[in-house]
């Protein structure tokens, strides 16, 4: 009941005209970003963080704007999946399987409506899950000491490498590259410069926003330059047709939506598994449970409903560990963590105690954004479809330039811009080599905290290593971390999406 | 082959990083762990994972042809030049040129690329500077 009281306070924070306007703008922008091929939740939000930051919005409104964009992008990803057979982002990959066949059969409008409804149901119930689960997790997190936190960070990297990537060695390499970047600059505890080579600009370290925008947004521009995807969408758009599905079709998909919401939420809460895995699991289970006539893959509405409910519900579930522990489990939540850190908010159990208005205002904004998205997506879908007609040869230059504007706005420093370009090139090379970018971002974001907790633990115990494994909680976290990293190696490919093993993901948005 | 080269590169990077970590000067106040230990751990994991990549490479990625690589190289140079000239010539001019170039290389007709570049630059200037009040680089002409 206490929780519901906090939620009511949250609605009081979120229901101002300014915040409602921001949520509306965020949802609209987000849907467009999600719909555009090549832009998805992580790089869309990445480009907008520096802008929201330099516009000087206070914490809560900025959060509301950006999380609306995040949810909106999760909605929008399905549009290009269904109409063009090109997933706007990786989680929308599974939606192409049944969505595009439906569109080809002249039922594009119905597929869009069903998927919009499924997105709403997934996200709506996942937000309820967040409301009730996050405070419970906070209670556990309050028992954590520095040693447990260090173990938790290791766990986040281990499961991300083990479950969500194709090659554990490359994921580990990516994580330590990120952590290594985080060590650049003056050491916070002793005040000595590290890895700065006497360069004054490096004394402050490398701003994580520079790294994120470079790795996610600019590398995308390079990918497009490489393939010169100039023509693309223009001629392939399918007619939308009627946008109100018959009630019978809606009713037949409701059980699928319900099951997928549960699976997606669980997948989202687990560390290392983001929305992509959520939609994959939801689709696979749904296929196993209800595909009696072999209609899946040929345009079954349930095959559209399941992955969409799954990925939106996973997106909500992924917010649980991010808000309650400060440890994101996927690419998009890593970007959201970056947003919180940029606003000088450190998520974790203390956030719930010290800034309940921020947390509950945000959660209330998620509910509001969801309803807005449903209201916006059903009637306006043909407007969003038109966005797909913008050719990438005009879109990508604009994306690059807006990235520059955002980073320039933070510091006004030429050096940062050059570093961002360097990150863009690095991101492109690493994508070609199939090295996941998300662990790098996570390393850059968490490196400082990770080292601080390790050294704090050592200071408390006077440098005794064994004290890292001193409590049952810590041992449990370490065990989970090792199992999460090693088990996928042994069990092989069972846990991972088969489709994600193909190199389609190269050009796709990470998670 | 690419992965093996990448592994060697990662290993050299680890060696360089570890060497730089030994060069960190200690200050007179320090915690029992010190500023060096965490970098040592990072360097070690980097070395191990690079070795694994070297020994067990993935399938070869599809590298673009030399012409495409050159394309990316030139685009990088344009972006760096953009960063360096931004303060000198102002936001609108630099952005128009850089955006036109990118649009042209992504397959637009030169004329429509120039129009797109100018529109992008002016559009960003109007929305972000005039409407939202973000500070952009001012050139000699005040924009």
Image (tube, coloured by chain):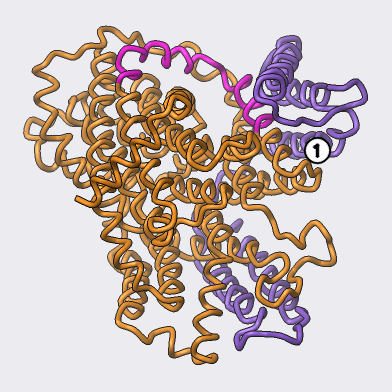
Chain colours: A orange, B purple
- Residue A139 on image: x %, y %: 29, 65
* Secondary structure mostly taken by the magenta-highlighted segment of the chain: helix
| Magenta residues (range) | A375-402
Residue A444: image quadrant is: bottom right
Name the residue at 39% across, 58% down: A353
Q: Is residue A89 left or right of residue A284?
A: right
Q: Examine the rendering and report whether any part of residue A31 can be seen.
A: no
Element type where label 1 sits in the image: helix
- Residue B79 on image: x %, y %: 77, 36
- Residue A7 on image: x %, y %: 29, 43
The disc numbered 1 marks a residue on which chain?
B
Name the residue at 28% across, 65% down: A491
Number of residues whose C-alpha sits closer than 10 Å to that of mark 1, classed few (under 14), some (14–19) or many (20 or more):
many
Q: Is residue A151 above or below residue A160?
A: below
Residue A360: image quadrant is: top left
Residue to which mark 1 is pinned: B83
Is A395 included in the stretch rendered in magenta? yes
Query: Toward the viewer: A491 or A281?
Result: A281
Q: What is the quadrant of the C terminus of chain B in the image?
A: top right
Name the residue at 28% across, 7% down: A241
């Amino acid at each position: 009941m206490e929780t519901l009281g906090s939620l009511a306070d949250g609605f009081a924070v979120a229901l101002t005209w300014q915040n409602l306007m921001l949520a509306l703008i965020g949802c609209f922008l987000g849907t467009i970003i999600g719909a555009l091929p090549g832009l998805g939740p992580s790089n869309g939000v990445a480009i907008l963080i520096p802008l929201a930051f330099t516009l000087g919005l206070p914490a809560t409104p900025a959060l509301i704007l950006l999380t609306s964009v995040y949810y909106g992008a999760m909605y929008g990803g399905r549009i290009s999946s269904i109409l063009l057979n090109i997933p706007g982002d990786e989680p929308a990959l599974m939606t192409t399987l049944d969505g595009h066949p439906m569109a080809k059969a002249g039922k594009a409008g119905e597929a869009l409506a069903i998927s919009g409804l499924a997105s709403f149901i997934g996200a709506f119930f996942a937000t309820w899950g967040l409301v009730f689960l996050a405070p419970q997790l906070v209670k556990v997190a309050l028992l954590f000491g520095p040693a447990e936190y260090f173990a938790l960070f290791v766990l986040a990297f281990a499961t991300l490498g083990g479950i969500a990537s194709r090659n554990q060695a490359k994921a580990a390499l990516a994580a330590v590259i990120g952590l290594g970047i985080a060590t650049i600059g003056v050491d916070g505890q002793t005040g000595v410069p590290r890895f700065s080579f006497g360069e004054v600009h490096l004394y402050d370290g490398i701003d994580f926003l520079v790294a994120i925008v470079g790795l996610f947004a600019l590398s995308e521009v390079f990918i497009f330059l490489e393939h010169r995807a100039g023509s693309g969408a223009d001629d392939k758009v399918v007619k939308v047709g009627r946008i109100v599905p018959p009630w019978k079709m809606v009713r037949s998909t409701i059980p699928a939506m319900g099951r997928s919401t549960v699976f997606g939420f669980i997948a989202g809460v687990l560390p290392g598994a983001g929305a992509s895995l959520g939609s994959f699991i939801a689709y696979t289970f749904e296929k196993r449970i209800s595909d009696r006539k072999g209609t899946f893959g040929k345009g079954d509405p349930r095959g559209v409903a399941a992955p969409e409910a799954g990925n939106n519900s996973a997106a909500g579930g992924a917010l649980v560990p991010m808000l309650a522990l400060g440890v994101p489990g996927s690419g998009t939540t890593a970007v959201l963590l970056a947003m919180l850190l940029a606003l000088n908010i450190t998520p974790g159990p203390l956030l719930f105690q010290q800034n309940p208005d921020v947390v509950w205002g945000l959660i209330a904004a998620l509910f509001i954004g969801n309803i807005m998205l449903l209201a916006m997506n059903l009637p306006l879908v043909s407007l969003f479809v038109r966005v797909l007609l913008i050719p990438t040869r005009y879109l990508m230059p604009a994306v690059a330039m807006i990235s520059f504007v955002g980073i320039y706005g933070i510091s006004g420093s030429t050096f940062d811009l050059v570093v961002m370009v360097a990150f863009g090139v690095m991101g492109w090379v690493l994508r070609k080599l199939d090295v996941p970018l998300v662990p790098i971002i996570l390393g850059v974001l968490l490196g400082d905290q990770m080292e601080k907790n390790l050294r704090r633990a050592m200071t408390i115990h006077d440098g005794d290593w064994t004290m890292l494994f001193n409590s049952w909680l810590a041992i449990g976290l370490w065990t989970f971390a090792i199992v999460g990293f090693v088990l996928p190696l042994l069990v092989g490919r069972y846990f991972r999406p088969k489709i994600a093993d193909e190199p389609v993901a190269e050009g796709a948005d990470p998670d | 082959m690419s992965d093996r080269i990448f592994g060697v590169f990662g290993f050299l990077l680890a060696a360089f990083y570890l060497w730089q970590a030994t060069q960190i000067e200690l200050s007179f106040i320090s915690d029992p762990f010190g500023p060096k230990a965490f970098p040592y751990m990072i360097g070690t994991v980097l070395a191990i994972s690079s070795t694994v990549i070297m020994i067990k490479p993935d399938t070869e990625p599809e590298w673009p042809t030399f012409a495409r690589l050159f394309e990316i190289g030139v685009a990088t140079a344009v972006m760096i030049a953009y960063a360096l000239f931004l303060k000198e010539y102002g936001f609108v001019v630099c952005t128009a040129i850089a955006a036109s170039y990118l649009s042209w290389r992504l397959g637009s007709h030169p004329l429509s690329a120039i129009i797109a570049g100018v529109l992008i630059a002016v559009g960003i200037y109007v929305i972000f500077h005039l409407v939202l009040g973000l500070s952009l680089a001012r050139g000699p002409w005040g924009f």
